[in-house]
Image (cartoon, coloured by chain):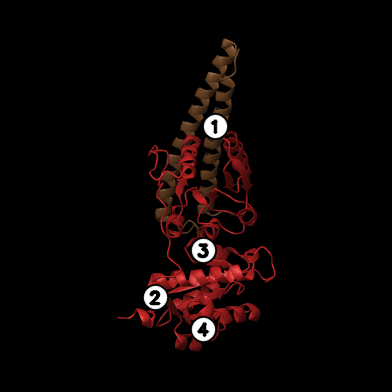
Amino acid sequence: MPNNVLIVDDEKFLTDTLGAFLKSKGYNIFKAEDGQTTLNIIKNEMLDLVLLDIKLPGVDGIEILRLMRRDYPQVKVIVMTAYDMEYKQRVDDIGYDAFFLKPLLLDDLTREIERLLSGEKTATPLAEDKIKNTRQPVQGPQFTPLEGALPKARLLIVSPRNLISGLLKDYFSKREICNGIYEITESGLEQLEHIRKFQPDIVLLDIALVGMLGEFGLTLMNLPQPPKEIILFGDPAVKWEEVEALTRRGTRFIEIPSDLHDKGYPIKDTIERLDNAVKDVCIKYGLVKKEKSYEP
Amino acid sequence: MATIRELFHSLGNKHNILTVGCGATKETVEECLKAEGLSKIVKDNLLEILKNLEQITNEALEADKIATEIHDRIYKIIDPDTGKPG
């Protein structure tokens, strides 16, 4: 039975040409030129391997990679990008099976695909001057950080959308659901005294606060005890320039559309992605509490 | 107006189209060469095409190296997202 391969790139010539080439090699090919189509195919098809361009319109390749690693770990992922070594640390943290900087050479790509799908443990030697930075899969942060320990943090939710902030507050308040110990508060942009007193470890910031993100972010970072990280969330359809600039610098962004009944973004999945982002930060900064039964 | 980062990204994609396009075309030509009964002139022409495709691929890779050099120098002095001195 032929292997199912998904090719994801916003250049149609590339998906068509690469698709025809790999089809001639005996693979069953799916193609996508944007993030949403990619998500639909991933969810509906039994894929063996994904060739993933990082820079995509709509849902970006990094979020797709994160989803793949979390929900479809058996699917091999080859990450491709052009000049965006700035993204490399982010994709390293998530993990992949191979990384190619464009321009691609088809012989080398084919060899790598064959190696991954055959389940070979050692890499076939690749021409150093043609393929850069191919590496073995990196283990991303674990979502259950330590045996017998839970993420523990103060979360500040800043959102004009009462329904979504209520849902998040409800979710993170229930330890048995979110599997973490979180102290939660909500705030508006002006309630700086309240924020200063609360001393949030992590800020969940809705991008619906158009035009104020940058200034508010700076204000937070200038607090006597600034938060460890700000995690952006919001409707990907209104992800505007300031958000793009922040995400290119490494700020996490989790899609939660305005329409909470959007079938492309099941609310349970989107809140879990936000939960995972919070847990990533907790692991990174050691914001954990050991369970009593594991204490000496 | 596109940012410097976006321009370099587009440039990288253009080089990629060259190498992938040449690679796929090379594969097609190699398949043609397997056909039986090809005249010498057809065979020679196909081999010439393969040679030219190899040349285009190498030139695209060289262009990419030059673009990478420019990218690295520019990124040291200019913020690629704002275009202002970094």
Report helix, strand or loop for mark 1.
helix
Q: Label 4 sits on what residue type?
A: Ile
Q: Label 1 sits on what residue type?
A: Cys
Report helix, strand or loop for mark 4.
strand
Label 2 sits on residue: A148
Q: Label 2 sits on what residue type?
A: Gly
Measured as percent of width and height from the top left, residue A36 is found at 64, 57
**Chain B rendering hue:** brown
The Cα–Cα distance between marks 4 and 1, rounded to whole angstroms, is 56 Å
Measured as percent of width and height from the top left, residue B54 is found at 49, 28
Which of the labelled discs sits on residue A238, or is there none?
Answer: none
Front position among marks 3 and 2: 2
Q: For mark 2, does the 10 Å Cα neighbourhood hold few (<14), some (14 to 19), or many (20 or more) residues?
A: some
Query: Disc 3 vs disc 1: Cβ atoms closer than 8 Å?
Result: no
**Which quadrant, please, contains the N terminus of chain A?**
top right
Q: Residue at x 51, y 63 (%)?
A: A247
Measured as percent of width and height from the top left, residue A114 is found at 48, 40
**Which quadrant, please, contains the C terminus of chain A?**
bottom left
Which of the labelled discs sits on residue A184, or is there none?
Answer: 4
Instruction: Indicate which disc, 3 or 2, sits on the residue closer to the N terminus.
Output: 2
Q: Residue at x 55, y 53 (%)?
A: A55
The Cα–Cα distance between marks 3 and 1, rounded to whole angstroms, is 34 Å
Within the image, what quadrant is residue A284 found in? bottom left
Chain rendered red = A
Which of the labelled discs sits on residue A247, or is there none?
Answer: 3
